[in-house]
């Protein structure tokens, strides 16, 4: 199968490529891949573990190997021998120039960037270029995944975002102030009939107009915001208190990170949508809103080693207040990259089984899953297993 990555030279994308090629060569194991669990036996028939990669990027390096080498020098997040063993495969991945439309001031932290809008293109011209790039790569077994930097919250307009007709009129009228890069990528993928996943907190395919397009074109899509670290622990741990009928009074999450992700999120407008995505999970899961502090700060020397300090104040029997603490310390790309491959495989499986629209059963992979109230990690995993079992058994 093929995966078209938005943000192809980012650390998550390049780590996914390296892992996929290293597994194919027998260099490393399949640990970390949900789709390789026994519950999903038979997935290989629909989505073989063999990948070809392409994508869009705004940091125009020579190829994915050069990008991966840059990330490795900063993070040393796996043995260098693995990177060199897949050098030839990564050198063949050369990204196309993309868009960063309305991606916020944080995007400047990425350094020298080149975008389609810098060429003076209209929305219609940008969309056409995106579609042409994807079409030159894609086949019937291609999935598009957005792993680009977090965008600010969009300027929502019911007129332009509430229906497909309105969205396409926005493009025709060149109303750039209402568009964002993630919307345009999602629109292009769904218009071409390609499954789409939004691994970021950005808008992506979540607006009504693009949900309508997915239904119209019978395309599955999923998102938003990959659940990889501190929020994964939060949505796994918080149900424990609910199961024991204890009240969470307050929850403090303090996250520090470096690398390009941290640089982009150091901008207030970019950080806002990320904090919102992380902060909503408690209320959705518990049915009430404990006092909550969610903070994200840039800490350069950590690079991609994201660290979270969490403090939970909870009330137990006889009204006694007690405390629970945990620290999450992990290389984000290592926990995120396998999920890119998982999600792509499940979306291709969904397409082949005739699933269209939002695949809410893939909520297990996201902080802010679309069109579902199931946030509890345990429940999400059971939903995923049952969904797969039922679809697999269909003739």
Image: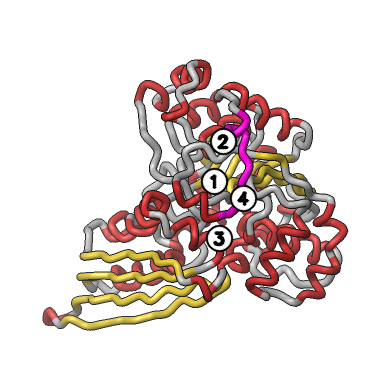
Kind of element beneath mark 4: loop
Measure the alpha-carbon separation of dots 2 and 3: 23 Å
Whether 118 is among the magenta residues is: yes
Kind of element beneath mark 3: helix
Q: Earlier in the sequence, mark 2 or mark 3?
A: 2
Q: Earlier in the sequence, mark 4 or mark 2?
A: 4
For the record, the magenta segment spans: 110-119
Q: Earlier in the sequence, mark 1 or mark 2?
A: 2
| Residue at horizontal 72 percent and vertical 62 percent from the top | 68
Reading the image, the residue beneath label 4 is: 112
- Image marks 2 and 3: residues in contact by CB distance under 8 Å: no
Measure the alpha-carbon separation of dots 1 and 2: 8 Å
Residue 393 on image: x %, y %: 66, 46
Q: Earlier in the sequence, mark 4 or mark 3?
A: 4
Among the 4 quarters of the image, the one containing residue 376: bottom left
- Image marks 1 and 4: residues in contact by CB distance under 8 Å: no
Q: Nearer the viewer, mark 4 or mark 2?
A: 4
Measure the alpha-carbon separation of dots 4 and 2: 25 Å
Whether 147 is among the magenta residues is: no
Marking on residue 186? 2
């Amino acid at each position: 199968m093929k995966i078209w990555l938005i943000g192809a030279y980012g650390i998550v994308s390049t780590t996914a490529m390296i892992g996929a090629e290293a597994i194919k060569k027998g260099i490393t194991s399949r640990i970390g891949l949900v789709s390789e669990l026994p519950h999903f036996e038979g997935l290989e028939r629909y989505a073989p573990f063999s990948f070809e990669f392409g994508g869009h990027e705004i940091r125009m390096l020579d190829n994915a190997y050069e990008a991966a080498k840059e990330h490795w020098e900063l993070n040393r997040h796996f043995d260098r021998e693995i990177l060199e063993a897949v050098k030839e495969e990564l050198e063949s991945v050369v990204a196309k120039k993309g868009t960063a439309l309305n991606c916020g001031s944080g995007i400047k932290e990425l350094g020298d960037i080149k975008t389609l809008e810098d060429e003076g293109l209209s929305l219609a011209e940008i969309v056409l270029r995106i579609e042409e790039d994807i079409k030159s790569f894609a086949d019937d077994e291609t999935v598009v995944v957005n792993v680009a930097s977090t965008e600010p919250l969009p300027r929502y307009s019911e007129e332009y975002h509430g229906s497909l007709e309105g969205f396409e009129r926005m493009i025709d009228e060149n109303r750039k102030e209402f568009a964002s890069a993630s919307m345009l990528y999602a629109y292009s993928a769904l218009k071409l009939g390609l499954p789409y996943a939004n691994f970021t907190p950005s808008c992506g395919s979540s607006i009504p107009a693009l949900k309508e397009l997915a239904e119209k074109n019978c395309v599955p899509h999923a998102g938003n915001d990959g659940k990889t670290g501190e929020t994964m622990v939060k949505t796994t741990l918080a149900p424990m208190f609910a199961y024991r009928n204890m009240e969470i009074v307050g929850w403090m999450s303090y996250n520090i990170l470096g690398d390009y992700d941290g640089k982009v999120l150091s901008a207030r407008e970019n950080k806002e949508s990320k904090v919102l995505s992380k902060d909503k999970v408690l209320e959705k899961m518990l049915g009430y809103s404990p006092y909550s502090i969610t903070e994200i700060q840039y800490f350069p020397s950590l690079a991609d080693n994201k660290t979270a300090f969490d403090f939970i104040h909870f009330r137990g029997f006889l009204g006694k207040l007690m405390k629970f603490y945990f620290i999450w310390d992990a290389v984000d790309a290592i926990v995120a990259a396998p999920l890119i491959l998982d999600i792509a495989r499940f979306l291709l499986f969904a397409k082949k089984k005739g699933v269209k629209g939002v695949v809410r059963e893939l909520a297990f992979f996201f902080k802010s899953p679309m069109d579902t109230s199931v946030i509890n990690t345990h429940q999400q995993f059971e939903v995923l297993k049952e969904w797969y079992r039922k679809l697999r058994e269909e003739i």
